[in-house]
């Protein structure tokens, strides 16, 4: 049995939506341990949730069940989904939330299985058209935690919804990518990976009309208030302000262009 279940939602903390999901889970699987990854995903921001899942999931023990509910299509024809990524399980809507996990699974060679949740005996008896997190995803996760096989809760599919990925382009002078995530501190994660920088030598980073010289090892390598480029904990090139907020300083947003210019070009 799997005893660990995580929750990732855009519900916030004010209204109790996350808490009632926990109540449903514990009513079915009282032995489960519940961990909140976050309930502060921006409303309906599927891409942000996909980014958080891809960064965090691999650090959990084998057989952890990850429930993610960022579901602007709730109550429509969008499918409810369960997925096995290697030793981890995802439960949530089929709307692209698994995009970056899928990409990582392909890169790492993790086996993947996708299931359309179409077995209502594993749901609550009454299903709201607007709260599948409580009525469908939470009970399915609880039944999985109780040892129900993933192939019992749904029918195998092979066509999950995947969002377009942010490509890194090779240019004459280096690389071009984009901002993919802005965290609580205002740090700007980008689509450019540490591995993409291999062989470029000394580089500068251009974003929003500003050029940052070099890629630092850590925040403390620059003075407080200074813009810095570095490799973040997910292995992605990031732009930050030391003890400050790069998003506010630069007026940056997700999707902004980031350029790498190599001094050897």
Image (tube, rainbow, N blue to C red):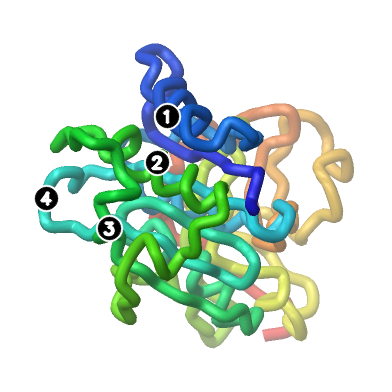
Residue closest to the eye, 8 or 174: 8
Per the image, label 4 sits on a secondary structure element best described as: loop
Residue closest to the eye, 191 or 24: 24
**111 w.r.t. 118: above or below:** below
Badge 3 or badge 4: first in the primary sequence: 4
Q: Mark 1 points at which residue?
A: 24
Local crowd size for mark 2, using a 10 Å CA cut-off: few (<14), some (14–19), many (≥20):
many
**214 w.r.t. 261: above or below:** above
Per the image, label 2 sits on a secondary structure element best described as: helix
Residues under labels 3 and 1: Cα distance? 17 Å
Left or right, 205 with respect to 256, comes to right
Q: Mark 2 points at which residue?
A: 139
Q: Name the residue under label 3.
A: 119
Quadrant in which residue 173 is drawn:
bottom right
Quadrant in which residue 257 is drawn:
bottom left
Cβ–Cβ under 8 Å for marks 1 and 2: yes
Per the image, label 1 sits on a secondary structure element best described as: helix
Badge 2 or badge 4: first in the primary sequence: 4
Cβ–Cβ under 8 Å for marks 2 and 4: no
Residue 264: x %, y % from top left: 74, 83
């Amino acid at each position: 049995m799997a005893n660990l279940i995580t929750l990732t939602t855009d519900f916030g903390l004010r209204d109790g939506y996350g808490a009632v999901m926990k109540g449903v889970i514990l009513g079915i699987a009282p032995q489960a341990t519940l961990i909140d990854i976050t309930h502060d995903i921006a409303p309906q921001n599927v891409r942000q949730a996909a980014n958080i899942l891809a960064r965090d999931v691999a650090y959990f023990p084998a057989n952890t069940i990850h429930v993610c509910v960022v579901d602007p299509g709730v109550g429509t024809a969008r499918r409810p989904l369960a997925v096995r990524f290697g030793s981890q399980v995802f439960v949530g809507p089929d709307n692209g939330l698994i995009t970056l996990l899928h990409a990582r699974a392909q890169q790492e060679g993790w086996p993947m299985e996708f299931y359309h949740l179409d077995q209502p005996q594993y749901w609550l008896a009454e299903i709201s058209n607007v709260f599948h997190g409580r009525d469908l995803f939470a009970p399915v996760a609880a039944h999985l935690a109780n040892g129900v096989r993933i192939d019992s809760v749904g029918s195998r599919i092979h066509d999950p919804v995947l969002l377009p990925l942010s490509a890194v382009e090779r240019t004459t002078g280096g690389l071009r990518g984009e901002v993919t995530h802005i965290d609580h501190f205002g740090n700007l994660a980008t689509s450019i990976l540490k591995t993409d920088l291999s062989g470029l030598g000394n580089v500068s980073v251009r974003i929003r009309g500003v050029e940052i010289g070099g890629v630092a090892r850590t925040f403390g390598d620059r003075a407080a208030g200074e813009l810095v480029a570095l490799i973040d904990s997910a292995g992605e090139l990031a732009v930050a302000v030391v003890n400050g907020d790069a998003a506010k300083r630069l007026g940056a947003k997700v999707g902004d262009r980031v350029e790498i210019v190599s001094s050897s070009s």
